[in-house]
Every structure is written in C-alpha cells, then in structure tokens.
Amino acid sequence: MGPDADKHTDKHTDKHADNHQRRTTAPAEVPPPGRFSEDTLRELRRSSIMHVDMDAFFVSVELRSRPELKGRPVIVGYPADRSVVLSASYEARAFGVRSAMPMAVAARMCPSAVVIEPRHKLYYEVSGQIMAIFGSITDLVEPLSVDEAFLDVGGAIRRLGPPREIGELIRARVARELGITASVGIAASKFVAKIASTRCKPDGLLLITPEETIPYLHSLPVSALWGVGGKTVEVLARRGIRTVADVAASPLPSLRKLLGASGEHVYRLSWGIDPRPVTPVRLEKSIGAEETFATDTADDALLHRELLRLSHRTAERLRGAGMHARTVALKLRYADFSTITRSRTVSTPIDSAQLLYAVAVQLLESVGERPMTVRLVGIRAEQLEEAAHAPLQLSLDRRDDNWRAAEQALDAVTRKFGNKSVLPARLLDPANNHTANTDTANSDPAGQGNTGR
Ligand code: DCP
Ligand code: MG
C-alpha cells in the first residue's frame, strides 16, 4: 500500500469536504458563477452579509515569523505588571486566558504561555492588507476594527460565486497571502453574520440561511444578542429569561419595563430583525468625552488635569474603535451656560491621549482670557478614519518606551502649529501646566483649522 492509501478517500470524493464543512450547513449545490438564473441569484442574495474576523489576530501575525510556537499557548502583551493581554492563542484560551485580562493573572493561569511583545506597526500593515483583500471582493466593506469587517457580497455573486464560496475564497486568500486564518459568518443580517463568525471560530465558516435563522438564534443564550452584556444578562436571568427563545417569548411591554429603551431592540434581535445595511463609511463621525465640574472653576491647573483625563478616555475609545482623528475639538461651557468650541486639524491622524491633550491645551490657550468661570469641559475627536488606513502612528500602551515615538509625533504637531506650541515636558507633568509659558498662547501661525463655532 502506498503511503496515502488510507488518506485519500474523503478528500478525493468531495473536494469541499475539508475540515470546515462540519461547521457549515448543507453543501452548496449550485452551478459555477456566470450560470445563475435570476431566481437562483435572488435566492443566493438572501444571505449575502458576511462578517470576517481574524483568529487571534496579533498572535497569528507573530506566529508567521515564529512557526515553532504554533500549537502552544501564546500571549501578545507587554510583560509589565500593569499591562493586559491583547491577544491570546486558542491554546492559551484553553487555560482561561482572555484578552483584556491583566498579564499577571494570565501568567498565573497559564505559566507555560510564551509572551510576545506587540508590534503594532506590523499589525496595522497586515490590517491594511486584510482590508485590501476585502475591497477586491466588494466595495461594500464596513471595517469594525483592525481585524474584522462586514461585507455585503450580494453584488459579487455573479462574478465570484455563491456567498459560501466567496467566504472560502476570502479565507483562502487571507491564509495564502497573509499567512493567518480568518473566520467567516454569513447570514441575511449583520447581527446574525457576526454571531455566526464568533461561533465558528477559529478557522471556520458558518452560513445561516434565512430559514435556519430563527431556530438557530433561539437555541442561543441571551448573551449572544448584540448589546446584551453582563448586567443585562443578570437582569433577564432574574426573570428566568436565559435564552434568545425566552426573550422572543416575552411580551414586549415587560421587556421594555425591564430594559428600558433597549427592550425593543433586544426583542427585535431575538426574532432576527436587524435591517441595518453594510455601510462602507463609518457611522461614527466623532468620539468624545466631557465633564461637568462639581463647582464652576477658573483654575487652569484643574482644567488641564481634566483635559488630560478626558484625553485618555477619548483616546481609549478611539483605539477601541480602531480609529484615528484628524481634528480635535475643545468645548467649554461657561457658568451662564453659554458654550464655545474651538477645533484644530492636525497633519498626522492621532489616537494617543498625549497628542489629543497637546492639541486640547493649545485650543484652550487660543481661547485667551475667559470671561467667567467654566462649568463644563469636553474633548471631541473628529474627522475619524480607520486606523488601518491612516498613516501609522504610535501606540502609548507602554508609555516609557513609546516616548521617543511620541516625541516624533509631537514634532509633526509642532511643525504644524509652530515651534513653541508644544512642550513635551508639560505633558509629562500635567500638574505644572498652569505655569505654561505664555508664548504658547494663540499660536496658530497659519490660522489653520481653528474654527470657532
Ligand atoms: N485587541 C487589543 N485589546 C483588546 C482586544 C483586542 O489590543 N482589549 C487587539 C488584539 C487582537 C485584535 O485587537 O488580536 C483583534 O481583536 P479580536 O477581538 O478580534 O481578538 P482576536 O483576533 O485576538 O481573537 P479572536 O479569534 O477571538 O477574534
Ligand atoms: Mg479577531
């Protein structure tokens, strides 16, 4: 017997019978592309929304250059005490390791895990390549974060085949061209497609037809519904509502009473109702944070401290959304409730707290003398773009090591707004902000982007 004698059977009788088939529904019994009748096309287009998400993205990218670690528990994160797990291999997850868990906890759970420090620049590059593959399939790509997107492939079926084949094509291209694996969920709606990709991970594909949608959804726990997190799960569980089927069987008024406005949303999802289209441009136009002071204030140092805090909050949310901002806006509300905003556009899109803060302080200074005490201060990041498409900028996840990079980026701001406008030392020590050199006030040499509104 030849060496392949006991291997060939299944693989050769059905070329689709690879190891992903177990996660998929009935095999696609359709003719090759170009031969679809209008009826078939209509039928195939009923489930044309796809959610594609890379498996253990940062880890997978790292394993390309360290293949000997494949199959082992691997964590990407800074080893420092106060850092968190950014990405964990599925082998590490078997020990309970999850992203956002403190590194110290992860190390206790899985002492054998290999820890790799992140290389954000590399991930952003790969992210751009992922999005380029998606973009070659359809224009209808809605990136959600650095490693995932919704695609509506309805218009690509004639050219590339049924959605399932398009999903396998994307998975094959990501594997071959980028050396990582992706999971694909396909359904009639975004929310079911997202559930499908989550539940076929890693390295899987799951298509849920419109007919299968309700029975499938109803078999899931409530936590599978979009927007239903820990607290809502608890509230529902207290009423004995544990599965999506339980939600679907609940009268809408009682869900409204339990969950407020989101009661209706949750109810609709439980019946698979999610008409949101795949929207190529992000709906989020801006991300921001604001704070009302307990007592109105005229204190510069207090304002600066608050701006720094709000910068951190805004930057975290920007990074969480995988976005960079081109414009930073400052909002001040005075004691009499009159409100002003000042905004400025920077040359390099930013997502770091330090840079947001630097611009916010300039904007505050550009206001000049304030007519009365301040009641509220806010920061808003505007003109957002996908981090994947923006020129690379630093991550401040580990600040000490990133200060060099931070300073380089500050240089860009300085070039834009004048030499004395940004003083990194002030940023390092926000408590000293009120001693700021008055040279920096109103420095807007080109008058650019400083649009009082
Ligand atoms: N990420 C991060 N901080 C987090 C969560 C994620 O920096 N708190 C980064 C690392 C991830 C990447 O974003 O690799 C993508 O996030 P995912 O939620 O898609 O997680 P993974 O791709 O790592 O794993 P999964 O296979 O569950 O998608
Ligand atoms: Mg992922």
Image (cartoon, rainbow, N blue to C red):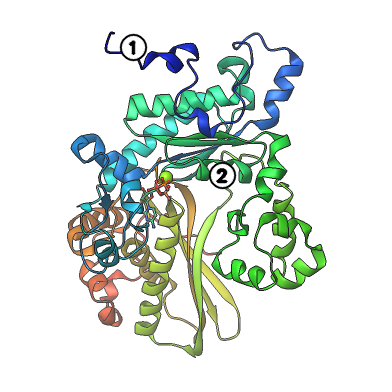
**Would residue 7 be seen by someone viewing this image from the given angle?**
yes
The amino acid marked with disc number 1 is Ala
Q: Residue furthest bottom?
A: 295
Please report the residue visible at 26 percent of the width from the left and 70 percent of the height from the top.
Answer: 427
Circle 2 residue: 194
Residue at image location 29% in from the left, 55% down from the top? 395
Give the answer, above or below, for where 342 lies relative to 325: below
Q: Position of residue 109 (x, y in %)?
A: 28, 62
> Badge 1 local density, few (<14 within 10 Å), some, or many (20+)?
few
Residue at which label 1 appears: 5
**Lower sequence index among marks 1 and 2:** 1
**Which numbered marker is on residue 303?**
none
Residue closer to the observer: 415 or 37:
37
Horizontal arrangement in the rendering, residue 434 relative to residue 232 (left or right): left
* Residue 279 against residue 284 in the figure, above or below: above
Expressed as whole percent of the image width and height from the top left, the position of residue 360 reads 39, 67
Q: Residue 116: in sight, yes or no?
A: no
Q: Looking at the picture, which amino acid does disc 2 mark?
A: Lys
Camera-nearest residue between 260 and 411: 260
Question: Cα distance, mark 1 to mark 2?
Answer: 40 Å
Q: Quadrant of residue 185?
A: top right
Say if 294 sits above or below 407 in the image: below
| Label 2 CA crowd tier, 10 Å (few <14, some 14–19, many 20+) | many
In the displayed orientation, state which residue is furthest to the front: 1
Where is residue 34 shown, x and y percent of the image?
62, 9
Looking at the image, is mark 1 or mark 2 nearer the viewer? Answer: 1
Mark 1 and ligand 1: say if the CB distance to the nearest ligand atom is below 8 Å.
no
> What residue is drawn where x is 63% and y is 17%?
29
Q: Position of residue 49 (x, y in %)?
A: 61, 35
Q: Quadrant of the N terminus?
A: top left
Q: Decide: marks 1, 2 in contact (CB < 8 A)?
A: no
